Image (spheres, rainbow, N blue to C red):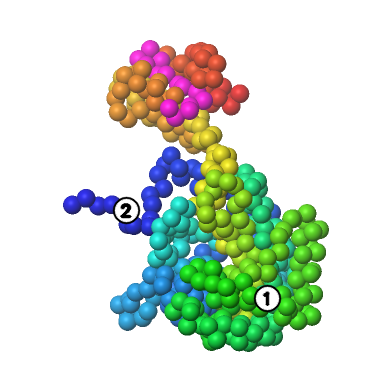
Amino acid sequence: MNFKVPRGTQDILPDVSWKWQRVENIIQSVCDVYNYKEIRTPIFEQTELFQRTVGDTTDIVQKEMYTFTDKGNRSMTLRPEGTAAVVRSFVENKMFGYADQPVKLFYTGPMFRYERQQAGRYRQFVQFGVEAIGSDDPAIDAEVIELAMTVYKRAGLSDIKLVLNSLGDKESRNSHREALIAHFTPHIGEFCQDCQNRLEKNPLRILDCKVDREHPLMETAPSLADYLNESSSAYFEKVKQYLDIAGIEYEYDPNLVRGLDYYNHTAFEIMSTSKGFGAITTLCGGGRYNGLAEEIGGPPAPGIGFAMSIERLLLALEAEEKSWTDEPSLDVYLVTLGDAARTKGFELIGKLRENGLRSEMDYMDRKMKAQMKSADRLHANYVIVIGEDEVNENTVQLKNMADGQQKKVSMDDLLEELKK
């Protein structure tokens, strides 16, 4: 029987995984500068957590979750997104009692959704996300957005744009909700079954429907912008003011609706504008979620966050023809000729690695020419050749692969020579 990788997943092979590591290093560096600390949560959680937070009218909950019953007859779900688990941990571990608020967290890890596989979209995918919980200051909204933009720019992307909207507070959302119900009700039978189910539960999600996006009522639907109360409008203006101060350009889109039920006030997406990227342009999405902590039994703790796909970031780099080609090089490759040289080389490579030098040697008993080709393929900066004469003399032949110069060096002086 031939086994293959499960549909909708992928193997990240060594010739690509170094790019992932580079992205992760950029993320770590940016989060460190912004003082966001890493949090790691379980890959599976109680199913009800996602039903209560993500929303039972969303496609994620209705169609895409990987749910199973464990041996204790409990319903568990592989996490489809990161925010719910982070907020659950925030409440459970009483982070709301920390002296320093807001609590600023980030995570990276696999998420799982049963979706149709497309370019840059998998059933197991890796997300980097940020959550700032405990403050309703518009400045923290701007900071979170700025952090996301900084990651993309550090990675090398330039063809990106920020799209912004306000979903308003509870009062504004309720007013808009009633207007949407009145607008769609007379013709709801013309819409898909999902939209019909959402009409009373969450009519805002109708505007995000991919099946009925061309229906004439979509164009004339009441705009949330017309129902924002004074405090919601003032909040949104403050967010935009801080983005202006940060020098971050944005587009206002009153029709932007995030696909999760817990958002309110600020909502945003970062999109690729590269011509070669494809039809689905969204790289990152996020927004404010005041009330989410209370939904799962915690005290009031307003929050804001985002999630970005690492797969789509790398795809965007390729679309801009800015994918990295400078794979990390090898510091030293040891070429050994004969049993005594291999024994000595094995001892020497241990010392090189102890001193932080990225080193490799031959384990296939190949001829010198084949070993040199291997060193070249691995982009070795230096090659150390050890043969019978070198073992007897306690020396090595040290070759600089950049200029081709080679010289005899005592093994006792080798580390100092390499440091030069």
Q: Give percent across and percent down for residue 379.
A: 48, 28
Q: Which residues are magenta?
A: 377-391
Q: Residue furthest left?
A: 1
Q: Classify residue 301 as left or right of residue 126.
A: right
Label 1 secondary element: loop
The residue lying at 74 percent from left, 55 percent from top is 249
Q: Is residue 384 magenta?
A: yes
Q: Is residue 266 magenta?
A: no
Q: Classify residue 204 as left or right of residue 223.
A: left
Q: Is residue 20 above or below residue 39?
A: above
Quadrant location, the C terminus: top right
Q: Classify residue 296 as left or right of residue 338.
A: right
The amino acid type of the residue labelled 1 equals Ser
Q: Earlier in the sequence, mark 1 or mark 2?
A: 2
The alpha-carbon separation of the residues under discs 1 and 2 comes to 45 Å
Q: Nearer the viewer, residue 399 or 268?
A: 268
Q: Nearer the viewer, residue 411 or 53?
A: 53
Q: Nearer the viewer, residue 14 or 364?
A: 14
Q: Give percent across and percent down for residue 279.
A: 52, 54
Picture mark count: 2
The residue lying at 79 percent from left, 59 percent from top is 244
In the picture of the structure, the residue carrying the numbered disc 1 is 223
In the picture of the structure, the residue carrying the numbered disc 2 is 5
The residue lying at 64 percent from left, 47 percent from top is 159
Which image quarter: residue 44?
bottom left
Q: Give percent across and percent down for residue 27.
A: 60, 52
